[in-house]
Amino acid sequence: RSVSGFGMPGTAVIENINAGDHIALVSYDTNDKFHGDAKDFNFTIAKANVTLSVLANDIVEGETAIIEIFAVNDDLENINTTVVLTINDKAYGEVTITNGTAQVPVADLEQGKYNVNIVTADDNYNFASASWSFYVKHATSLVVITEPEHEYGTPVVIDVKLNATSLNL
């Protein structure tokens, strides 16, 4: 990156430098008062700490699980970063967290327990991870049977209906 147009003495501010080792070169041209000069120096930007958390509610088969992921820095400020998402040892790839949050829908899960794990994927942050478990339960019975009271000599009528709440209608 280049910063120019500041007078001497002066201060140059360069924002959003990635973590790692860097070299800066400071130079100025000859003018009627000074001979031009250039100096370089090495500096290191340390990785920042991040705290991750993840959660998902239990669902019923046929519903879509929503994996919620959160990331904050040491000052508890929401941050932008990336994590790698794994569910039951199946990789779901990198997830971008914006303003401290991301939501990942996961469909077509069968009944059972699901272990969610996230780890940092951003080289600007120290390693961090978080885990959570949720369950996919079998759907409740779809059939509802009602039998009204009846008397001798009248036909027995049994009503069989589908439970609309189980169908998520």
Image (cartoon, helix red, strand yellow):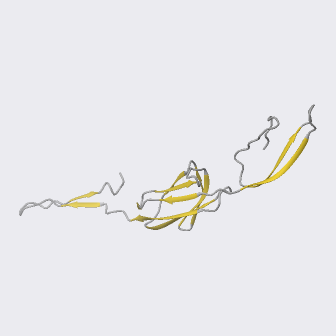
Count of numbered tags: 0
Location of residue 101 in the rendering, given as x and y in whole percent from the top left corner: 54, 51
Could you say where residue 10 lies in the image, as x and y percent from the top left?
79, 38
Instruction: Please tell me whether residue 110 is drawn above or below residue 21 in the rendered image.
Output: below
User: Which quadrant, please, contains the N terminus?
Assistant: top right
Q: Residue at x 42, y 57 (%)?
A: 63
Q: Residue furthest left?
A: 152
17 vs 142, nearest the viewer:
17
**Quadrant in the rendering for residue 29:** top right
At which x and y percent is residue 36?
92, 39
73, above or below 116, in the image: above
120 to the left or right of 163: right
Residue drawn at x 52%, y 59% is 53
Check the image and report above or below for 39 versus 85. Answer: above
Residue 117 appears in the figure = no
- Residue positioned 13% across, 61% down in the render: 156
Find residue 134 and report its image quarter: bottom left
- 148, 10: nearer the viewer: 10
Horizontally, is 1 left or right of 121 in the view? Answer: right
Specify the farthest residue to the top.
Answer: 32
Residue 121 pos. (x, y %) = 64, 59
The answer to whether one can see residue 149 in this image is: yes
Viewer-side residue, 160 vs 106:
106
